Image: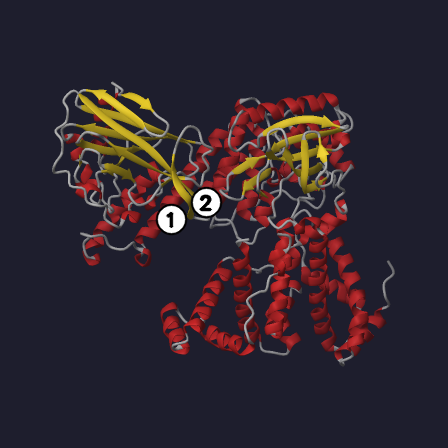
Amino acid sequence: MTRPPQHEITQLLAEWREGNQSALDELYPLVYDELHRLARRYMSRERKGHTLQTTALINEAYVRLVDQKNVHWANRSHFFAISAQIMRRILIDHARRHGYAKRGGGAQQVSLEEVAAITPNLSRELLRLDEALKSLAEMDPRRSQVVELRYFGGLNNEEIAGVLNISANTVTRDWNMARAWLYQQLSETTAN
Amino acid sequence: MALSTTLRDYGQLNPERWQQISRIFKSAISLDPEARNAYVAGQCGSDDSLRAEVDKLIASHQQASEQDFIGGMAAEAAAPLLIIEDEVGPPQRTLSNGQHFGSYVILDPLGAGGMGEVYLARDTRLDRTVALKILPPDISGDKRRMQRFRQEAKVASSLNQPNILTVFEFGEVGGLTFLATEFVDGETLRDHLRGKKKLKLVEILDINIQVLAALDAAHEANIVHRDIKPENVMIRRRDHVVKVLDFGLAKVTEKKISKDDESEAATAFKTAPGIIMGTINYMSPEQAQAGATDQRTDIWSTGVMLYEMVAGKMPFSGATSSHTIVQILEKDPLPLTKDVPAELERIVLKAMAKDPDERYQTAKDMLIDLRSLKRRLEVQAEIERTSSPSTERPAAIGDQPRAAQGNKRGVVIALVTVMVLVTAAIFGISMWRSTRERAKLVTPAAAVPATVGERKLTYWITVQKFKNGKPYQDPFPLAGEINFEATYQIRVNVQSPQAGHLYILNEGPASTEPEFVVLFPSTTANEGSSLLAAAQTVQIPEKSWFRFDRQQGTEKLWLVFSAEPVPELENVKQYANRKAKGLIPSAAENKSVQNFLTQHSASKPESEPGETLTTLKSSGNLLVYALRLEHH
């Protein structure tokens, strides 16, 4: 895969930061590909423990994609914000493509296989969380973004505060409220 | 129901309401519970629905924190989703839904992987649902190994051990080798471990105890699993019963990694890294060296699994397969954290002794150690529960005021301890608590004098199904053989055409010292009198149900029906109150009860089992009968 030139991404990030939404449209697939590629590579390296260090991964993508010489301080925040969104996209895409997600009951039988253990529950839960998060975004975009940055982007509260330009305390409060609401929504549908 | 849950409307609120709730919630969760209630009440005023929303959200907040809901990273939790596509590619399906395959109709794919595809299918001959496993040709090609697998799978399955997955059929259709097994609606232990809820120690022990019960039965029949790992352990959704899969298969699959029968397995791992990823972490040192293996290799793997479940990480895990093998052969696993009971660490390390001779020699030995540890933990939890004032059960009629109980609590706790050890593991300890309401009063005043020379007693058992912790459908009388699920609960009913003195005691599975629990009469049943009126029905427990736990064994319910009061038992009925929980406190008293029972049970009453009722008849003025409840 050919990697897009660093300056192009840096430029797009700057444009997006300045309010050019079409820059985001261009940026999105570029970052998506890079993150996806990295995520897969991380997984093949780390799969023994099935861990995936989101932050490390996004950091690596950032270093690879963004020209460090011309970096504006806000670029990093913006990059993380978009990366969180994209990580969410990547995982949801995977969950959807995962054929068994459509099995409502999540029934499964296994397992002669190892790594390829089937994970319909995982897919289903992820899809449900995504839907609930969309509902939350309609009601309260900021709280939904806090969840996205933290859960999908792997950012800590201070970083989130920086990206959203709010205090870290507000991030904590937003997180508590959003998480409680999401939990409530998901537990109410679990019975199905 | 495809995706219906994901597409439903979530409970959206209008923005003002949301802001209002959010404002109250924000402050409320920073307060301690009492101040919080007052605060929420004050803020909500007479708006009950607001109050309900806020309360619900606060409860969700607490549960979400306890369970660390979305506490990790999505990418970590969902990492396996990324792997599947990359490593295996989108699943290839050999069979499609609705397709006939021999006498089976394919219903749905259940999963696929390196070791074959699994489908949910209907067996049209027996009209039952099965899991159909299609083995890949490279494995099924070796006739000699397949023959052996077929045999071992059959033997393991025929053991009829509830924790071993039942194999129904092994066959071939159109060149495809398949295995039809019992369908377990649940998830693998691997998925279970990935779930959002952290497993409690007692749950971890319980799962391993069940795995060991399966292994114990298999080992007895000379079958070694050789591939114990979380992927091969299923947990049934409805009752958490554990099923061990694929007995006998490991030996066959070695073929896959080792072309030459005699070549060392370890070499195969080095030359083909990744092929058997995941398996290797659970391999015993003797397996890693391709040495001779016996049942103790399964002990090792169970130890690794137990370690992993407790520590949250594998004991042996290197960057590559060869590194992992080196660790398995040479390294000691990192010690478990301090909050893990020392006894558990001892058990885990003993199971993972490098030298098989130093390991547990049988699955049963390890099972026994885990089981007693589990009981000990349950007792501790019970002590903590009973000694915590906030969770103390409501005072019973006649209970002393709390202040006066002070020093007595120690005594009560000690009793609870013994009782839990002996019987509560089988009969839910909630029984006394749930008999809060007084039983309906039956006046035995007009008792018909007992016919001298004969005693008659009829009993029957009622079964209540439970679903999600709630009674489900109507109770029904136990008749003949039923498929008794672990979630079912029972009640024993006793009646006699004669009047007489009735005593019911429970004796738990054999232990060194006899220990009994007096179930009837109790302070709430029959006004504490043992005198039973003619045709009066006694049900035990009165208001609740007996619940089996996973401990296996025979539970005895002693039924004693006598024309005259029985002094040995009249003396102990005083303990049948909520506080003592029916437990007879002194060894001497237990002994005297045991003496009485053994002495008189020698002459067994005549038993006439009917469809649902069993009538016992004995000559003489005394009937003593042990109703045995087998629990597997």
Given the image, on which type of amino acid does mark 2 rest?
Answer: Val
x%, y% of residue B114? 73, 39
Q: Secondary structure at mark 2?
A: helix
Labels 2, 1: one chain: yes
Given the image, on which type of amino acid does mark 1 rest?
Answer: Ala
Which quadrant of the figure contains the N terminus of chain A? Answer: bottom right
x%, y% of residue B444? 15, 38
Residue B576 horizontal side relative to residue B132, left or right = left
Chain at tag 1: B
Q: How many marks?
A: 2
x%, y% of residue B97? 71, 41
Crowd band around label 2 with a 10 angstrom C-alpha radius: few (<14), some (14–19), many (20+)? some
Residue B153 horizontal side relative to residue B421, left or right = right
For the question of whether residue B149 can be seen, the reply is yes
Task: Give me the residue at 70% from left, 55% from top.
Answer: A96
Q: Which residue is mark 2?
A: B202
Q: Which residue is the extreme one toward the bottom?
A: A18
x%, y% of residue B380? 37, 47
Task: Give me the residue at 21% from left, 50% from top.
Answer: B408
Residue B340 horizontal side relative to residue B129, left or right = left
Q: Which residue is mark 1?
A: B381
Mark earlier in primary sequence (2, 1) = 2
Q: Are marks 2 and 1 in contact (CB under 8 Å)?
A: yes
The quarter holding residue B259 reads top right
How are the residues colored? secondary structure
For the question of whether residue B335 can be seen, the reply is no
- Decide: is B202 above or below A33: above
- Decide: is B219 above or below B26: above
- Decide: is B304 above or below B169: below
Measured Cα–Cα span from mark 2 to mark 1: 10 Å
